[in-house]
């Protein structure tokens, strides 16, 4: 039973990092946030356009659905535009110099 | 003032049922579908145990940074901090500007190079490298225990809130929330936990901003709010430091020294720098620069989120001056649900309910996803079933996730004996996190600290904090007016005891050989782990030092209007 040494753990984690597939296979979260907030924004804005007097009175005379919906819609669009302007980076192939970067033993 | 132990458990008032309709439930339903969809979509990115437990150390800084803040912005924090504000007033800002920002900046600038650079997969694993197996095992088990307990607190709080607001029976809320958390973490591992946390961050903002704006409008703006509160509670209620001189009395039951030392230094550094549920988010970042920026990016929203929880709490205190006392029908924890009921029309109400539920689930998921990592990597793979193939540990991680969720359902009932959810959490943190922080700070900055000192420091610190809380405070040997004040003192006691014992043990035992400390102690570098800077990381707005000091200056500046 040897003590764990720093080198064992670093070697193990380095190996796993090379086999890891998260970077290449994970989807881009910006698309999900953008999509969800555009949908939410539209739903809540519709509720704002059709707001009853009682709803307006409750919210201190502010059409809070309209404003919140607009804010959410803009946030959603921001993420979609960001995704459009800076698309997901193509899967990075392990750089040739990354592999022999193992520590000298 | 009331004795905290005699208060009723955290039940929300019965009259808080929200007038939800189909529109609100549609909004909630869409969210649950997306949460599950993220779990399924993230599943195909999981191949190795590193993918499952640390997202393959590959996420960008903005995602890990927002997940870092979100893991902390659980619903217990939101309701608890609003409750703090309704009870104690503007002192709540201390939890953010003194009690979070300096520690987050310290984590990013000073500690992260050791954490990330040493390639450890968890906080206890760092203790294994720096000290020895006994310190490692003790901290792993304490952490796993605390994580399940806190996940249970979230689940219990969710159940009573959902019961009060939506009328669902408690067991339905527990089963539904538990199932969704279980499903998305088992499927996608940490990646799906983190992605859902980022989503939750934006939903909770969309919920809190309308509540804050309408609440302020209702009481006549900030001026109207302070006038009402000053009339009812005195001038100190809306200031940060009023009445905190030593020997003065204030509702918080703490003076400036215990605030700065207990909350600002010991409790907050303990929580932010060694709580693995937080640190794990930074360890999943794609390189050292992104890992350093994780808590720094989180610091900026943290500075301003206090307004979104404190103002609703203050507004509730202004509208219902007897809140928290028998007769008003409202507990302090009801502040935000009360405003939701009073102010939000259907639509935004659905967003607010969704945000609250999302925050409960994210708070629980953060603890479950850190629990499964520590239990699998630090307990199971090192002491029970060693040296199996990597796929075995991914399977085991999925199994232990299910067990962790079931265990946290069990612990949910432990949470029922405290009136203020936040004090309960902080009591636990002072028992578990503070000694960990002692071991880190002494171990990182003092080369001489020996392998054995870690274990004894952890043990002594935890014991001292518990003795202070359960014997000295609860039995009234020293009079401390409130639970919160006692928490601060327990934290200081745990810190001092841990540090003294570590120094004493180190002086009588042999130090670790110098070559085993490379990259673990301040002033050393780990050989062979230096990585080239990623393209674009030299941009000025990505410089950790600038981001960090910017946050500290901004937080200090925020104090100015509250100190006059």
Image: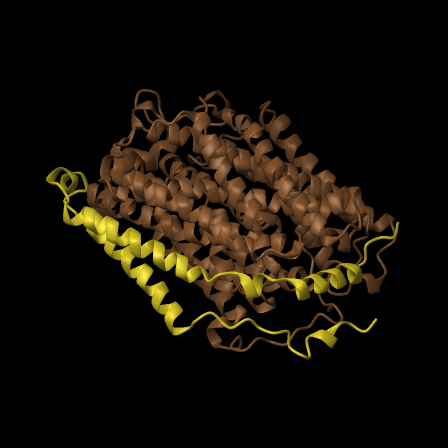
Chain colours: A yellow, B brown
> Measured from the top left, where is residue B319 in percent x and y?
25, 34
Viewer-side residue, B119 vs B466: B119
Q: Is residue B327 above or below residue B259?
A: above
Can residue B117 be seen from the camera position used here? yes
Please tell me in which quadrant of the rendered image residue B517 appears: bottom right
Q: Viewed as shown, does residue B260 lie left or right of B231? A: right
Viewer-side residue, B396 vs B213: B396
Q: Residue at x 22, y 53 (%)?
A: A67
Q: Residue at x 54, y 33 (%)?
A: B152
Quadrant where the C terminus of chain A sits is bottom right
> Measured from the top left, where is residue B368 in percent x and y?
57, 42
Q: Residue at x 39, y 51 (%)?
A: B305
> Measured from the top left, where is residue B216 in percent x and y?
24, 45
Can residue B78 be seen from the camera position used here? no
Q: Residue at x 67, y 63 (%)?
A: A19
Viewer-side residue, B486 vs B528: B528
Q: Viewed as shown, does residue B186 lie left or right of A9? A: left
Q: Viewed as shown, does residue B353 lie left or right of B217? A: right
How many numbered discs?
Answer: 0
> Measured from the top left, where is residue A16 in percent x and y?
69, 61
């Amino acid at each position: 039973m040897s003590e764990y040494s720093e080198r064992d753990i670093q070697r193990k984690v380095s190996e796993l990092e090379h086999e890891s597939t998260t970077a290449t296979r994970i989807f881009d979260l910006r698309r999900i946030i953008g999509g969800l907030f555009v949908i939410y924004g539209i739903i809540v804005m519709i509720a704002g356009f059709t707001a009853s007097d009682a709803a307006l009175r409750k919210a201190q005379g502010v059409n809070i659905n309209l404003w919140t919906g607009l804010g959410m819609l803009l946030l959603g669009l921001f993420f979609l535009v960001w995704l459009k302007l800076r698309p997901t980076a193509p899967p990075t192939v392990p750089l040739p110099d990354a592999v022999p970067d193992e520590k000298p033993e | 003032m009331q004795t905290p132990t005699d208060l009723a458990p955290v039940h929300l008032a019965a009259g808080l049922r929200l007038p939800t309709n189909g529109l609100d439930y549609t909004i909630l339903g869409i969210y649950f579908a997306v949460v599950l969809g993220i779990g399924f979509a993230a599943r195909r990115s999981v191949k190795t145990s590193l993918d499952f437990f640390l997202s393959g150390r590959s996420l960008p800084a903005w995602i890990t940074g927002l997940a870092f803040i979100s893991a902390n912005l659980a619903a217990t924090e939101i309701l608890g901090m609003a409750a703090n504000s309704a009870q104690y007033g503007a002192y709540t800002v201390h939890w953010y500007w003194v009690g979070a920002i300096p520690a987050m900046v310290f984590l990013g600038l000073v500690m992260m190079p050791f954490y990330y650079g040493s390639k450890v997969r968890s906080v206890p694993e760092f203790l294994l490298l720096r000290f020895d197996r006994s310190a490692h095992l003790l901290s792993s088990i304490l952490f796993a225990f605390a994580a399940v307990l806190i996940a249970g607190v979230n689940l219990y709080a969710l159940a009573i809130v959902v019961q009060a607001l939506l009328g669902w029976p408690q067991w339905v809320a527990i089963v539904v929330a538990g199932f969704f958390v279980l499903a998305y973490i088992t499927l996608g591992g940490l990646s799906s936990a983190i992605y859902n946390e980022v989503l939750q961050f934006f939903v909770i903002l969309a919920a809190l901003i309308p509540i804050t704006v309408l609440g302020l409008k209702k009481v006549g703006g900030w001026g109207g709010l302070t006038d009402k509160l000053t009339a009812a509670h005195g001038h100190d209620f809306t200031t940060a430091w009023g009445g905190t001189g030593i020997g003065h009395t204030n509702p918080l039951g703490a003076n400036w020294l215990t605030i700065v030392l207990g909350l600002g230094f010991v409790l907050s550094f303990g929580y932010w720098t060694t709580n693995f549920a937080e640190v794990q988010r930074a360890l999943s970042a794609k390189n050292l620069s992104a890992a350093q920026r994780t808590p720094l990016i989180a610091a900026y929203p943290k500075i301003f989120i206090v307004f979104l929880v404190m103002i609703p709490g203050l507004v509730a205190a202004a509208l219902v001056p007897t809140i928290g006392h028998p007769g008003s029908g409202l507990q302090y924890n009801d502040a935000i649900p009360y405003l939701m009921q009073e102010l939000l029309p259907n639509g935004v109400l659905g967003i607010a309910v969704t945000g609250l539920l999302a925050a409960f689930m994210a708070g629980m998921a953060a603890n479950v996803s850190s629990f499964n990592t520590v239990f699998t990597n630090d307990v199971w793979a090192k002491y029970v079933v060693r040296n199996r193939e990597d796929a075995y540990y991914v399977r085991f991680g999925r199994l232990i996730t299910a067990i962790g969720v079931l265990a946290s359902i069990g612990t949910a009932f432990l949470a029922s004996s405290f009136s203020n959810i936040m004090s309960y959490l902080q009591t636990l943190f002072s028992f578990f996190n503070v000694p960990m922080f002692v071991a880190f700070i002494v171990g990182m900055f003092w080369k001489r600290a020996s392998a054995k000192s870690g274990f004894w420091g952890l043990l002594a610190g935890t014991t001292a904090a518990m003795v202070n809380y359960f014997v000295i405070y609860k039995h009234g040997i020293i009079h401390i007016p409130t639970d919160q004040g006692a928490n601060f003192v327990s934290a200081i006691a745990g810190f001092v005891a841990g540090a003294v014992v570590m120094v004493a043990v180190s002086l009588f035992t042999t130090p670790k050989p110098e070559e085993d400390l490379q990259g673990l102690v301040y002033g050393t570098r780990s050989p062979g782990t230096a990585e080239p800077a990623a393209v674009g990381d030299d941009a000025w707005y990505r410089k950790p030092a600038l981001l960090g000091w910017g946050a500290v200056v901004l937080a200090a500046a925020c104090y100015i209007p509250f100190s006059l």
